[in-house]
Structure formats: structure tokens, C-alpha cells
Amino acid sequence: MAGPLRPLTRVAPAPVDEQGLVERLRASLAAAAYFLLFVPAVPLLVLSLLLVPLGLTGLGIALAHAVVPATGALARVHRRLSGALLGETLPEAYADTTGRGFLARPMVWLRDPHRWRDVGFLAFSATGGAVLAGLPALLLVTPAVHLVLAVTTGGWVGLVLLGTALLAPLLWWVLTPPLVRARAMAERSILGVSRGDLERRVEQVVESRAETLDHSAAEVRRIERDLHDGAQARIASVGMNVGLAEKLMATDPAAAAELLREARESTVTALEDLRSVVRGIHPPVLADRGLAGAIEALAVPIPLPVTTSVAVPALPAPVESAAYFAVAECLANTVKHARATRAWVQATHDGEVLRIVVGDDGRGGATPTGSGITGIARRLAAFDGWMTVTSPDGGPTQVTMEVPCRTSPADRPTER
């Protein structure tokens, strides 16, 4: 399949040469693949059209769990084939159904415009797309069929068939590349990302950037306030105590010694305040032990059993910091609100996406609109990440966070 999946670079009429012949044979093989994929498109189209009316009886919901994923898989094959012929990638943009239940998932599919595009793709594949894909093969077999008919028929009909037999190879040479490319471009229009999707994505990026700037400004103000109220005040106190001790050194050595002792204690306290501020910016445990060790350290002081399973490579420091604080917030919410007896943290990385799941067996009822959860979502959005919360009444609660973060093939996850 690697040969036909090379980009189709030349579609204009070209001289008859070896390269042109290879490209047209490759295009014909791609057209044959398109045409063969028409076979599953027809029943899937019929079943897709029946899902909505059958959904009223409940049968459609069960059937959707087979038809919609199968349609998505077929569309994925077409995206790969058409994208390869066009020399580009056709991404998927389906609504996320992670953590959705058996009944909730079809509701998401019903509202997802990209799933409806898949239905339109099935209709195209079963009609006009099949015609575009079938013409190159038809033109290839026409000479042999017409020559046989011309010999067996004879007369003026045989002459007409002979003429079309001689014309068909020329039409195949001229029309095959543009027909196959037209099919690929049509599928890009149906299955690719639309202008509206790009505009919504730009709006999300702008909104995420504004929230990130607001968050950064709030963090700067917090750091300034912590320094002003903590370390700065203590250091100023140290200066005053040392100054007074200097004046009392000759007249009252005992009082001077007491002031110096207080200055030393204030210095120690100021250092602790500075360490606290630094931990709020980038926890030292991340630099020392990585994300796996940092998550283990988070779990130690939690007053309930926390199981951790972290298998991630070294990631960029901002991503690790965001993941660390997101896990910390989730565990803090578990302690404060969940009434749980145990919790768990799982983190994996597949080379493209960092995926973290934080769960507990508490009472449930967590909502994505809570201040803590909203803060996590805002923090992840800065890295184009997303989050889903599954928390039915009675529990369990599970927060799934994903952050796109590509690593090199040399990086190997280490499980802790």
C-alpha cells in the first residue's frame, strides 16, 4: 500500500513516459481502493439514516455503538488515503466522549457536526464518489472488452467499438490523475477541518491566551504580595534589629545579643518564606525527581491511601509544572469534598499526549464548574490541553486530563 499512497503530484496531460505510466498506474490502484471501500459505505449509510428513528425505540442507541465507530474507522481509512494522495494530513475533530456512559455517548454523537459529516461522506462515497473511482478502472478494461465485441459483432457497430477501444487508453491517460485527485479533494472538503472549525479554534486560542495572561498576572500579584508580607517584612525587621544591636553593643551587650538572636530567627523564617514562594512557582521536587517522583511526593501527606502509577518520560518544565499543580488540586479536592477511603493517580504518555487520571471512591457529585476544577481546566488550556470529569452521585469520581506534548523517540517512559 506504500506505493499508491505517495502524493499525486502531476495531473495535467503529460508525455507518455515511464514516470507518467507509473503515476497513472498508482492512481488507478488508489481509485480501485476507493471503489472497493464503496462496498461497506452503502450498508453503513442505510444504517446511519435509520439510527435516529430507531433511537426512539432504544434499538438505535444500541445500534449506534456499532455503526458510528465503524463509520469513523472507514472515514479514518479515507482520510489516510486522500491525505496521502494530496500530500497532507487530514485530522479528526470528533467531540470527545471519554468517560461518557452507554446512553450519554450517542447524545454526544448526535450533536457532533463531524459525525454528521461522516454521514455525508458515506452518501458521497456510495454515489458520486463511486463514479469518480470507477471511471479509471472502466477505461482500463474498455479496450479489451470492445475489441472482443468488435470481432464478434462486425459491421458498423464493430467499427464503432473498435474506435472506442482505441480511444479509451488515451482517455485513461488524460483523465485518471484529475479524477483521482478530484475524489481526494472532495473527501478533504467533507472530512477535513472546515473554515468554521478553524475560526472556532482561533477563538479558543485567543480566549485561552487571555485567561493565561490573567492567570499569569494574578500569579505575579500573589508572588509580590507573599514577598511583601513575608520575606520582605522579615528582612526589614532583621535590618532594624541589627541596627539597634549595633547601638546597644557598647552600653547593653545583653540586649544587643537578644536583638541579634531575634535577627537570626527572622532570617531563618525569611528563608522559609522564600522557599515557600519558590515552591509555588516551580516545586523543587520536580527538578529533583521528575513528574513521577513529584506525584509520589504529593500522595505521601494525603490522609488516605493513594495509589500512583506514573509512566512518563522527561517532559518540558512548564508541562510538568502544570500537570503537578493539576494533580495537587485534584487530590486536595478529594480530601476536602469527596469523603473517600482511597484515591489513585495514573499518568501515561504515548509519545504525543500526556494523559493523567485522578480518581477516588468518594460520594461523587463533582461538577466541572467548581472553582478548583475550572482553575485546572484554565491551566491545561494554556497548553492546548483538556479535561473531563465523570462524577455520578454516589461516586466514583474520575478526572481525566490530557495535554498534547510530543517527545522524541529516544525518550522512554519510566514507571514509578
Image: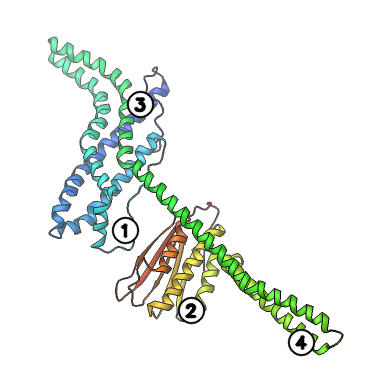
Tag 4 and tag 3, C-beta contact below 8 Å: no
Location of mark 4 (residue): 258
Amino acid tagged 3: Arg
Disc 2 element: loop
Residue 113 x %, y %: 28, 48
Answer with the quarter of the image where residue 190 lies: top left
Which residue is at 80% across, 82% downward? 245
Badge 2: residue crowd in 10 Å (few <14, some 14–19, many ≥20): some
Location of mark 1 (residue): 97
Location of mark 3 (residue): 24
Mark 4, mark 3: which one is toward the viewer? Answer: 4
Say left or right for 286 vs 308: right
Residues under labels 3 and 2: Cα distance?
66 Å
Q: Considering only order in the chain, which callout, 4 or 2, is on the residue closer to the N terminus?
A: 4
Badge 4: residue crowd in 10 Å (few <14, some 14–19, many ≥20): few
Q: In this view, does 133 lie above or below 251?
A: above
Say left or right for 145 vs 210: left
Mark 2, mark 4: which one is toward the viewer? Answer: 4
- Which is nearer the eye, 403 or 197? 197
Say left or right for 271 vs 38: right
Q: Considering only order in the chain, which callout, 2 or 3, is on the residue closer to the N terminus?
A: 3
Colour scheme used in the picture?
rainbow
Amino acid tagged 1: Thr
Q: Which mark is residue 302?
A: 2
Residues under labels 4 and 3: Cα distance?
94 Å
Mark 3, mark 2: which one is toward the viewer? Answer: 2
